[in-house]
Amino acid sequence: MSNRFTQYILIAMVLGIVTGTLIFNLMPDGRAELAADINLIAMLFLRLIKMIIAPLVFATLVGGIAHMGSGAKLGRIFAKTMGWFISASFVSLLLGLLMVNLLQPGSNFPGTLPDKTQSTGLPVSAFSVEKFLTHLIPTSIADAMAQNEILQIVIFAVFFSVAMGALPERSKTLLQLIDDIGHIMLKVTSYVMLFAPLAVWAAITATVAKNGLAVLWKLVVFMGGFYVSLLILWAVLVVVGFVVIGPRYSHLLKLIREPLMIAFSTASSEAAYPKTLEGLNRFGASKRISSFVLPLGYSFNLDGTMMYCTFASIFIAQTYKIDMPLGTQLAMLATLMVTSKGVAGVPRASLVVIASTLSQFGIPEAGLLMIMGIDTFLDMGRSATNVIGNTLATSVVAKWEGELGTEHALGPSDVVPPDMIPGEVPAMAGH
């Protein structure tokens, strides 16, 4: 079934390109309206994903932490997770910085530059340390779940599950209920994912129908350089995966083909979350680890987004011929390390982060207008890279904690092994 689903996604992507190109070429007057109508299908799918994310994250996270044991173990896992996230973010930012200086995609830019006084309309003051820290704590868990604020849900879930662990006798019935909710939500997820191929077709069709493939040629040097950089980042992540996890890491790459394609074609890491969680659990990563590390990764470990921030920022400086000494570039990297955290759930988050950073370093914010038209095509690569980075982080932490078992053989009615439920032993099978 997995291979067939992968084939459906690939077919949907190809059909989307063909359909979108036909609409763009044959309907010059009404293509924007038709693209918007078709995109509604993709938007409905993303809304279905958003519908299940909050209860799925809460139930799996609380269940995982409650079964984790001592608070010391939770603290150790958190420290290892954040250490990995910070290191991966630094590597991604630094690699973007190195590649944009090596490739110089903004030098001798052939197009007309936007006027420096033009505004992008992006909220450049959206990110600060103070706002980020106050945003961490939800004023209401109901509001956090309604807004799909994953980081706030994680904060509340940690407090909730630790409190449950402190009251084991009183929590038994509630924990069983939460475990059951987690399994039910994963079953709901399997139903929602049936619509993924149709959503992929709609997303690709709408994007190509609205912009056409020709728009890519206007910034082909910038796009080509960025995707080459992403491929190098992928190679780095894959090499690290084989070094830390060993040869079986190749199996994880096979298991996450579907979430990778979903993330790429819909330009949304969030859309790939359920399938990513399923792939990690099939790989053998403990439910306790995957349900804790993966949600955190959606705020702190966006490797593709990190690379894009430095790559795009320096590219804009190059187009306006603004001198950026090494010290200034490193200061920008340090700034992006802070301002880029907690971007999950913010519309056009990477553009907002870049806009706020440009203003701090005297680079015209208007430069973003050059790349906003192709941002969806760039976001496809960023989103897929984020999936690679988060699956690697989760499996590595599981390996470090000794909770990376053999791969699970899952039945058609079960999307994850039931290791959240005390007393049940998941079926295991060699791969």
Image (spheres, helix red, strand yellow):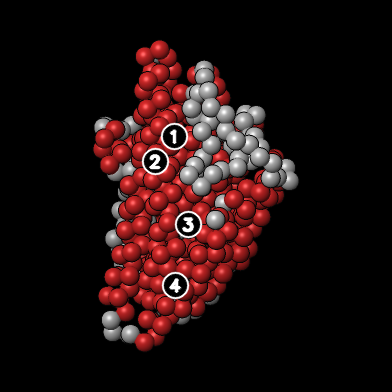
Numbered mark located on residue 263 in the image: 3
| Residue 224, image quadrant | bottom right
Q: Which residue is mark 1?
A: 60
Which comes sooner in the sequence, label 3 or label 4? Answer: 4
- In the rendering, at what x and y percent does residue 339 appear? 42, 45
Numbered mark located on residue 16 in the image: 4
- Cα–Cα gap, marks 4 and 2: 30 Å
Residue appearing at x 33%, y 85% in the figure: 27
Q: Nearer the viewer, mark 1 or mark 2?
A: 2
Q: Are marks 1 and 3 in contact (CB under 8 Å)?
A: no
Q: Amino acid at mark 4?
A: Gly
Q: Are marks 1 and 2 in contact (CB under 8 Å)?
A: yes
Quick one: SS at disc 4?
helix
- In the rendering, at what x and y percent does residue 71 appear? 50, 19
Image quadrant holding the C terminus, namely: top right
Which comes sooner in the sequence, label 1 or label 2? Answer: 1
Numbered mark located on residue 185 in the image: 2
Numbered mark located on residue 283 in the image: none
Image quadrant holding the N terminus, namely: bottom right
